[in-house]
Amino acid sequence: MSDVTHPDPPGPHVPGDLGHGALGRLTAVVYWFAVVTVLLAVAASPTIVLLLLLDRSAGNVLLVAVAAIPVGPALSAALYTMRDRERTGEADGELAPARSFVRGYRLGVADVLRVWVPALVVLGVIGTVLVNAGAAGVSGPYAVVLGVLAVAILTWALHAVAIATFFNFRTRDVARLATFYLGRFPVVSLGVVSLVVVAGAAVWVGTEVLLALVGGVWAWFWYRGDQRLLDDVRDRFTTAD
Protein backbone atom coordinates (compact mmCIF):
# COMPACT_ATOMS: atom_id res chain seq x y z
CA MET A 1 0.00 0.00 0.00
CA SER A 2 1.01 3.60 -0.44
CA ASP A 3 2.34 5.26 2.67
CA VAL A 4 1.35 8.87 2.07
CA THR A 5 -1.76 10.91 2.46
CA HIS A 6 -3.02 13.60 0.13
CA PRO A 7 -0.84 16.66 0.78
CA ASP A 8 -2.39 19.46 2.74
CA PRO A 9 -2.68 22.80 0.97
CA PRO A 10 -1.03 25.91 2.33
CA GLY A 11 -3.20 27.84 4.73
CA PRO A 12 -5.84 29.74 2.72
CA HIS A 13 -5.97 33.51 2.91
CA VAL A 14 -9.29 35.22 2.46
CA PRO A 15 -9.97 38.91 3.02
CA GLY A 16 -12.20 39.75 5.88
CA ASP A 17 -11.49 38.46 9.35
CA LEU A 18 -14.79 37.65 11.01
CA GLY A 19 -13.31 38.10 14.45
CA HIS A 20 -12.74 35.77 17.37
CA GLY A 21 -15.80 36.54 19.48
CA ALA A 22 -18.87 34.35 19.79
CA LEU A 23 -20.70 36.18 16.98
CA GLY A 24 -17.63 36.00 14.73
CA ARG A 25 -17.23 32.28 15.31
CA LEU A 26 -20.93 31.65 14.69
CA THR A 27 -20.81 33.70 11.50
CA ALA A 28 -17.75 31.76 10.34
CA VAL A 29 -19.48 28.42 10.93
CA VAL A 30 -22.63 29.51 9.09
CA TYR A 31 -20.58 30.89 6.22
CA TRP A 32 -18.50 27.72 5.93
CA PHE A 33 -21.45 25.34 5.92
CA ALA A 34 -23.44 27.54 3.56
CA VAL A 35 -20.62 27.60 1.01
CA VAL A 36 -20.00 23.85 1.27
CA THR A 37 -23.72 23.12 0.93
CA VAL A 38 -24.01 25.26 -2.19
CA LEU A 39 -20.88 23.78 -3.78
CA LEU A 40 -21.97 20.25 -2.92
CA ALA A 41 -25.34 20.91 -4.55
CA VAL A 42 -23.67 22.38 -7.63
CA ALA A 43 -21.25 19.44 -7.96
CA ALA A 44 -24.14 16.99 -7.58
CA SER A 45 -26.56 19.04 -9.71
CA PRO A 46 -26.58 16.53 -12.62
CA THR A 47 -27.85 13.92 -10.17
CA ILE A 48 -30.42 16.25 -8.64
CA VAL A 49 -31.78 17.30 -12.03
CA LEU A 50 -31.97 13.74 -13.37
CA LEU A 51 -33.70 12.47 -10.23
CA LEU A 52 -36.25 15.27 -10.42
CA LEU A 53 -36.98 14.35 -14.04
CA LEU A 54 -37.20 10.59 -13.49
CA ASP A 55 -40.41 8.93 -12.39
CA ARG A 56 -40.20 6.86 -9.23
CA SER A 57 -40.87 3.63 -11.09
CA ALA A 58 -39.25 0.20 -11.00
CA GLY A 59 -37.93 0.58 -14.52
CA ASN A 60 -35.75 3.54 -13.56
CA VAL A 61 -33.65 1.91 -10.84
CA LEU A 62 -30.59 1.47 -13.05
CA LEU A 63 -30.96 5.03 -14.31
CA VAL A 64 -31.00 6.26 -10.71
CA ALA A 65 -27.72 4.42 -10.08
CA VAL A 66 -26.16 6.00 -13.17
CA ALA A 67 -27.49 9.42 -12.18
CA ALA A 68 -25.76 9.11 -8.79
CA ILE A 69 -22.26 8.96 -10.30
CA PRO A 70 -21.51 12.69 -9.70
CA VAL A 71 -22.44 12.33 -6.03
CA GLY A 72 -19.28 10.40 -5.12
CA PRO A 73 -16.71 13.06 -6.10
CA ALA A 74 -18.97 15.79 -4.70
CA LEU A 75 -19.13 14.08 -1.29
CA SER A 76 -15.38 13.50 -1.39
CA ALA A 77 -14.76 17.22 -1.94
CA ALA A 78 -17.11 18.05 0.93
CA LEU A 79 -15.21 15.68 3.24
CA TYR A 80 -11.92 17.26 2.22
CA THR A 81 -13.34 20.70 2.98
CA MET A 82 -14.53 19.59 6.41
CA ARG A 83 -11.03 18.43 7.29
CA ASP A 84 -9.62 21.76 6.17
CA ARG A 85 -12.10 23.56 8.40
CA GLU A 86 -10.80 21.68 11.41
CA ARG A 87 -7.14 22.12 10.47
CA THR A 88 -7.16 25.75 9.37
CA GLY A 89 -10.52 27.45 9.71
CA GLU A 90 -11.01 26.80 13.40
CA ALA A 91 -7.33 27.35 14.16
CA ASP A 92 -6.73 30.81 12.73
CA GLY A 93 -10.05 32.12 11.47
CA GLU A 94 -9.08 31.99 7.79
CA LEU A 95 -12.00 31.08 5.57
CA ALA A 96 -11.60 29.58 2.10
CA PRO A 97 -14.16 26.76 1.80
CA ALA A 98 -14.59 27.25 -1.95
CA ARG A 99 -10.87 26.92 -2.62
CA SER A 100 -10.68 23.87 -0.37
CA PHE A 101 -13.70 22.24 -2.05
CA VAL A 102 -12.28 22.72 -5.55
CA ARG A 103 -8.89 21.37 -4.49
CA GLY A 104 -10.47 18.37 -2.80
CA TYR A 105 -12.57 17.63 -5.88
CA ARG A 106 -9.56 17.84 -8.18
CA LEU A 107 -7.40 15.61 -5.99
CA GLY A 108 -10.03 12.95 -5.33
CA VAL A 109 -12.26 12.69 -8.39
CA ALA A 110 -10.35 9.95 -10.23
CA ASP A 111 -9.66 7.75 -7.19
CA VAL A 112 -13.19 8.13 -5.88
CA LEU A 113 -14.85 7.23 -9.18
CA ARG A 114 -12.83 4.00 -9.37
CA VAL A 115 -14.61 2.70 -6.27
CA TRP A 116 -17.88 4.62 -6.50
CA VAL A 117 -18.95 3.58 -10.00
CA PRO A 118 -18.58 -0.21 -9.51
CA ALA A 119 -20.54 0.05 -6.26
CA LEU A 120 -23.34 1.92 -8.04
CA VAL A 121 -23.47 -0.71 -10.79
CA VAL A 122 -23.89 -3.51 -8.25
CA LEU A 123 -26.47 -1.48 -6.31
CA GLY A 124 -28.37 -0.81 -9.53
CA VAL A 125 -28.52 -4.53 -10.32
CA ILE A 126 -29.63 -5.43 -6.79
CA GLY A 127 -32.20 -2.66 -6.78
CA THR A 128 -33.63 -3.84 -10.08
CA VAL A 129 -34.01 -7.37 -8.72
CA LEU A 130 -35.66 -6.14 -5.53
CA VAL A 131 -38.22 -3.88 -7.18
CA ASN A 132 -39.13 -6.71 -9.56
CA ALA A 133 -38.99 -9.43 -6.89
CA GLY A 134 -42.53 -10.64 -7.51
CA ALA A 135 -42.17 -10.92 -11.26
CA ALA A 136 -38.75 -12.52 -10.93
CA GLY A 137 -39.95 -15.08 -8.40
CA VAL A 138 -37.60 -13.84 -5.66
CA SER A 139 -38.66 -15.21 -2.27
CA GLY A 140 -39.06 -13.04 0.83
CA PRO A 141 -35.97 -14.30 2.68
CA TYR A 142 -33.82 -13.89 -0.43
CA ALA A 143 -35.12 -10.34 -0.88
CA VAL A 144 -34.14 -9.58 2.72
CA VAL A 145 -30.64 -10.92 2.09
CA LEU A 146 -30.35 -8.76 -1.02
CA GLY A 147 -31.53 -5.71 0.96
CA VAL A 148 -28.91 -6.29 3.66
CA LEU A 149 -26.27 -6.79 0.97
CA ALA A 150 -27.27 -3.50 -0.67
CA VAL A 151 -26.89 -1.64 2.63
CA ALA A 152 -23.48 -3.25 3.19
CA ILE A 153 -22.31 -2.30 -0.31
CA LEU A 154 -23.43 1.30 0.10
CA THR A 155 -21.69 1.50 3.49
CA TRP A 156 -18.57 -0.03 1.92
CA ALA A 157 -18.74 2.54 -0.88
CA LEU A 158 -18.89 5.45 1.54
CA HIS A 159 -15.98 4.03 3.56
CA ALA A 160 -14.05 3.66 0.30
CA VAL A 161 -14.82 7.24 -0.73
CA ALA A 162 -13.59 8.54 2.64
CA ILE A 163 -10.36 6.53 2.42
CA ALA A 164 -9.74 7.50 -1.21
CA THR A 165 -10.30 11.15 -0.31
CA PHE A 166 -7.49 11.34 2.23
CA PHE A 167 -5.01 8.64 1.22
CA ASN A 168 -3.04 7.84 -1.93
CA PHE A 169 -3.68 4.10 -1.90
CA ARG A 170 -4.11 1.92 -4.95
CA THR A 171 -7.73 1.23 -5.84
CA ARG A 172 -7.56 -2.42 -4.83
CA ASP A 173 -6.08 -1.42 -1.47
CA VAL A 174 -8.86 1.11 -0.91
CA ALA A 175 -11.38 -1.66 -1.66
CA ARG A 176 -9.68 -4.04 0.77
CA LEU A 177 -9.49 -1.43 3.52
CA ALA A 178 -13.15 -0.46 3.07
CA THR A 179 -14.09 -4.14 3.43
CA PHE A 180 -11.85 -4.52 6.48
CA TYR A 181 -13.40 -1.52 8.23
CA LEU A 182 -16.96 -2.66 7.66
CA GLY A 183 -16.50 -5.00 10.60
CA ARG A 184 -13.59 -3.50 12.51
CA PHE A 185 -15.57 -0.52 13.77
CA PRO A 186 -19.25 -1.54 13.77
CA VAL A 187 -20.28 1.73 15.42
CA VAL A 188 -18.70 3.71 12.58
CA SER A 189 -20.44 1.55 9.99
CA LEU A 190 -23.76 1.86 11.82
CA GLY A 191 -23.27 5.62 11.88
CA VAL A 192 -22.88 5.61 8.10
CA VAL A 193 -26.01 3.46 7.76
CA SER A 194 -27.90 5.93 9.94
CA LEU A 195 -26.84 8.82 7.71
CA VAL A 196 -27.92 6.87 4.64
CA VAL A 197 -31.33 6.27 6.25
CA VAL A 198 -31.65 9.98 7.05
CA ALA A 199 -30.74 10.89 3.46
CA GLY A 200 -33.21 8.35 2.09
CA ALA A 201 -35.96 9.62 4.37
CA ALA A 202 -35.30 13.20 3.29
CA VAL A 203 -35.70 12.21 -0.36
CA TRP A 204 -38.74 10.02 0.30
CA VAL A 205 -40.63 12.51 2.48
CA GLY A 206 -39.52 15.62 0.63
CA THR A 207 -37.45 15.89 -2.52
CA GLU A 208 -33.86 15.66 -3.64
CA VAL A 209 -33.73 19.44 -3.20
CA LEU A 210 -34.43 19.05 0.53
CA LEU A 211 -31.41 16.78 0.87
CA ALA A 212 -29.27 19.25 -1.10
CA LEU A 213 -30.22 22.01 1.35
CA VAL A 214 -28.66 20.12 4.26
CA GLY A 215 -25.81 18.51 2.34
CA GLY A 216 -23.05 20.39 4.14
CA VAL A 217 -24.31 19.40 7.58
CA TRP A 218 -24.75 15.80 6.40
CA ALA A 219 -21.15 15.74 5.17
CA TRP A 220 -19.93 17.12 8.49
CA PHE A 221 -21.67 14.36 10.46
CA TRP A 222 -20.20 11.82 8.04
CA TYR A 223 -16.69 13.22 8.48
CA ARG A 224 -16.98 13.26 12.27
CA GLY A 225 -18.41 9.74 12.32
CA ASP A 226 -15.60 8.40 10.13
CA GLN A 227 -12.87 10.12 12.14
CA ARG A 228 -12.01 6.99 14.11
CA LEU A 229 -11.73 4.96 10.90
CA LEU A 230 -9.53 7.55 9.21
CA ASP A 231 -7.26 7.87 12.24
CA ASP A 232 -6.85 4.10 12.35
CA VAL A 233 -5.98 3.96 8.65
CA ARG A 234 -3.36 6.66 9.20
CA ASP A 235 -1.86 4.89 12.23
CA ARG A 236 -1.86 1.39 10.75
CA PHE A 237 -1.21 1.81 7.06
CA THR A 238 0.82 4.97 6.55
CA THR A 239 4.27 6.04 7.66
CA ALA A 240 5.33 9.46 8.82
CA ASP A 241 7.44 11.57 6.49
Image (cartoon, grey):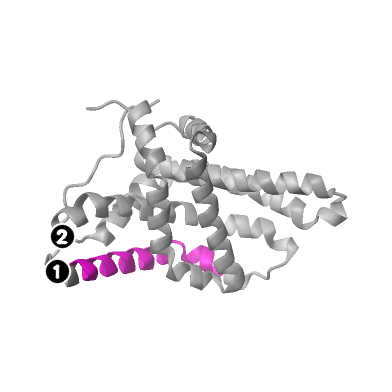
Quadrant into which the N terminus falls: top left
Residue that numbered label 2 is attached to: 93
150 left or right of 23? right
Using the rendered view, name the quadrant where residue 240 is placed.
Answer: top left
The amino acid sitting under disc 2 is Gly
The magenta stretch is 25-49
Residue that numbered label 1 is attached to: 18
Quadrant into which the C terminus falls: top left
Tell me residue 109's x, y (percent): 41, 48
Tell me residue 154's x, y (percent): 57, 47
Visible residue check, residue 2:
no
Q: Residue at x 22, y 49 (%)?
A: 87
Q: Secondary structure at mark 2?
A: loop
- Above or below, 70 against 117 in this view is below
Whether residue 217 appears in magenta in the rendering, the answer is no
Choose between 139 and 136: the one closer to the eye.
139
Asked if labels 1 and 2 touch by Cβ distance under 8 angstroms, the answer is yes
User: What label sits on residue 52 in the rendered view?
Assistant: none
Using the rendered view, name the quadrant where residue 156 is placed.
Answer: top right
Determine the CA span between mark 2 and mark 1: 7 Å
Q: Residue at x 76, y 57 (%)?
A: 131
Q: Secondary structure at mark 1?
A: loop
The amino acid sitting under disc 1 is Leu
